[in-house]
Image (tube, rainbow, N blue to C red):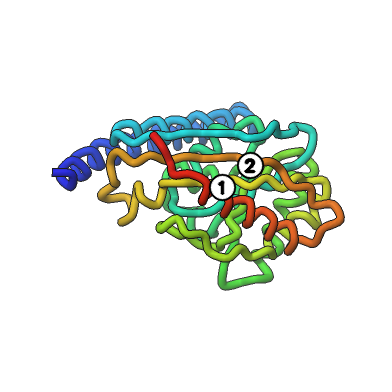
Amino acid sequence: MKKVIDYLLSCLYLLYFGLLLLIFHVIQVIAFNVFGKQAHKNVVDYMNGGIMLGWYLTGSTVRYRQLTDLPTDRPIIFVANHQSMFDISPIYWFLRKHSPVFVSKVELAHGIPSISYNLRKSGAALINRSDPKQAIMEIARLGKLIQQETRSVVIFPEGTRSPSGNMRTFAPGGVGVLLKRAPKALIVPVVIRGTGRFNPKGLFPLCSFTPMSWTVLPGIEPAGQTPEAVVQQAYEAMITELASSQVTA
């Protein structure tokens, strides 16, 4: 019976999701070309809030906790674990005050309504995993952007998704490049739970009635530390948080 419910509610959500992406794609284009970057950002924020809100159609729940006050007068590097494509929308919505920009695969910059357009226009670092030099240059450009505009960046140091929720070892290279260009940035770990269970087989079927959560941990001052030490510190804090409790609805 649960599988039947999963299929039915997944169909309902994917219809909603597809229509939302198509509608917001048009709104994004108008906002960016007529009203400018800030209007485009506002549209993207509400689009991601809408994506997240739609999860309630599947009976799933979203919980957000922020265990620290975050500064608005310096760049922030959010370091998050990565379970699925659904990790991203709540980060956009709940942390919209910090104007997060993402490090993403270059393949996602084309072919997906709304999402690809936003990646191209938001300043995201679009990296080619088979070209390390290009990836470093893109991440460095993004580090310079957040330093100049006092914005934030979201990076997934695992490098790939871990649907099981068991974190892979973090690679410090991307964070090191960002810190070189944005030396005043604060490192802030973000622990994500449950999204891997929500879409274990991709977009269809989704697993209904899944509790998901996003927890923002206290920041880490990188001054006087190597990128390797900072990333390890973030990793250990996130492992501790993941082990501390299970997701609750």
Can residue 80 be seen? yes
Q: Position of residue 57 (x, y in %)?
A: 30, 32
Q: Residue furthest front?
A: 244
Q: How many C-alpha atoms fall within 10 Å of the one at disc 2: few (<14), some, or many (≥20)?
A: many
Q: Which mark is residue 177?
A: none
Determine the CA span between mark 1 and mark 2: 9 Å
- Of residues 136 and 158, the one nearer the viewer is 158
On the picture, is 113 further left or further right than 97?
A: left
- Of residues 190 and 247, the one nearer the viewer is 247
Disc 1 and disc 2 in contact, CB within 8 angstroms: yes
The residue positioned 34% from the left and 31% from the top of the image is 56
Q: Which residue type carries mark 1?
A: Glu
Q: Quadrant of the C terminus?
A: top left
Can residue 124 be seen? no
Q: Quadrant of the N terminus?
A: top left
- Of residues 164 and 134, the one nearer the viewer is 164
Depicted 73 relative to depicted 104: above or below: above
Q: Which residue type carries mark 2?
A: Leu
Q: How many C-alpha atoms fall within 10 Å of the one at disc 1: few (<14), some, or many (≥20)?
A: some
The residue positioned 58% from the left and 65% from the top of the image is 169
The residue positioned 75% from the left and 61% from the top of the image is 229
**SS for dot 1:** helix
**SS for dot 2:** loop
Q: Position of residue 166 (x, y in %)?
A: 47, 59
Q: Position of residue 212 (x, y in %)?
A: 42, 40
According to the picture, the residue beneath numbered tag 2 turns out to be: 217
According to the picture, the residue beneath numbered tag 1 turns out to be: 241
The residue positioned 68% from the left and 63% from the top of the image is 172
On the picture, is 68 further left or further right than 29?
A: right
